[in-house]
Image (spheres, rainbow, N blue to C red):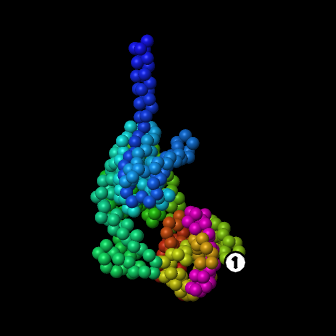
Amino acid sequence: MRQFLRIVLIVMILASCKGREGYVIEGKITGLQNPSLYFVIPDTNSQGVRVDTVLVKPGGRFRYEGNSQQLTPVILYMEDGNVWTTVWARDKDQLSVSGHVNFPEMIIAKGGEVNDLLAGFKTENKSLLQERRNLMDHHHSDVEMNDSLGTKMNYPEYESKLLNVDHQLKEKAEKFINNHFSSIASLVLIQDYLMDGSDPELVRTYLSKMEGDVIRDTLYRKLVRVNDKYCRTLPGSKAPDFTVLDINNDTIRLNSYRGKYFLLTFAASWCETCDKDNEDLVLLYKDSDRKQLEVLTISLDGDSTAWSHVIKEKKMVWHQVIDTDGWGSDIVSLYNITEIPSNVLINKESIIVGRNLPTDSIKKVIRFR
């Protein structure tokens, strides 16, 4: 009888161990002000997500256990969701995470091919990632900023430095992607560094070169879907129709401008670089013939009063729409706007002929008198 019970106990232990053959994520995140970590995992059965909460121990140490037969992105949110990082996990993986909460770009996940490749990319480009974070942290409106050498920067200098760092990181990402067409890590870098809508044809080229299990991954399908949408608003495409209410409560449609050139612009009162753009638009509008060009500006201000003040101050007398949905605006999504200021130039036949054009280029297209 004792021998039988011993066998039953061993079987139960083995079954229990087998049931725990999931993945383990453990590590240390320093600098946390809030001890709660939130693990968000896609639920393939319900097409939703599961959220688990873990409290860190003193010193920022934590441990999380999960289950997934397929490689899946586990998003780790910190500081009430203001900071996050992604760990790629599947059953039997032993994964480690380390970093400082104030420098999320350099939070490193190790274990498994995807995590190790991404960790290598971050480590190799640590100086660029640090410079980018320093620039963003020191960016405050209407004040001077210090660059990495401690010298003073005004806003144009800041913007130039940030664009230069972003360009270098994009080049590094492209080099990585060209060497890893069969890794999900390349999809992650496409998403992080190339999916800004500025060059959807380049993204389409890289996606077409992906191979193996990568092209069956959910992230691959998402990137293809989003990039196809970007491609539909490239110059040469028919402009998507829309209906909006302007500040005078008049209904504005794309067809309202048919038969003349139409400049659709996007801005906001809190956008510093929009000031110069607004001044250029005022001059452009004054120099143009209403039979040739009309302008419509979509403000992404949550507070309509703020944009109304800009309209009055800059004497912007063309049609204005204040979309308090901001980045959640339907027309922002429809025209794939990813930054402001932005503009879309549409010709007399409602065909997009340019995006983010300077006013001098707009004048050449329309051939002002």
Q: Quadrant of the C terminus?
A: bottom right
Residue 197 appears in view: yes
Residue 319 located within the stretch drawn in magenta: yes
Q: Which residues are magenta?
A: 308-334
Q: Position of residue 122 (x, y in %)?
A: 33, 57
Q: Position of residue 317 (x, y in %)?
A: 62, 84
Marks counted in the figure total: 1
Foreground residue among 198 and 17: 17
Q: Which residue is depicted at the point 38% across and 46% down?
A: 26
Residue 349 appears in view: no
Q: Residue furthest top?
A: 1
Q: Is residue 86 left or right of residue 256?
A: left
Badge 1 marks a residue whose secondary structure is loop
Q: Position of residue 118 (x, y in %)?
A: 35, 53
Q: Which residue is depicted at the point 59% across and 78% down?
A: 306
Does 144 appear above or below 47? below
Q: Quadrant of the N terminus?
A: top left
Q: Position of residue 251 (x, y in %)?
A: 70, 72
How dense is the environment of label 1, judged by Cα within 10 Å: few (below 14), some, or many (20 and up)?
few
Name which residue type carries label 1: Asn
Residue 225 located within the stretch drawn in magenta: no
Q: Which residue is depicted at the point 53% across and 81% down?
A: 278
Does 198 appear above or below 310? above
Does 241 appear above or below 17? below
Foreground residue among 98 and 360: 98
Pointer 1: what residue?
248
Does 86 appear above or below 156? above
Foreground residue among 315 and 43: 43
Q: Which residue is depicted at the point 58% across and 68% down?
A: 326
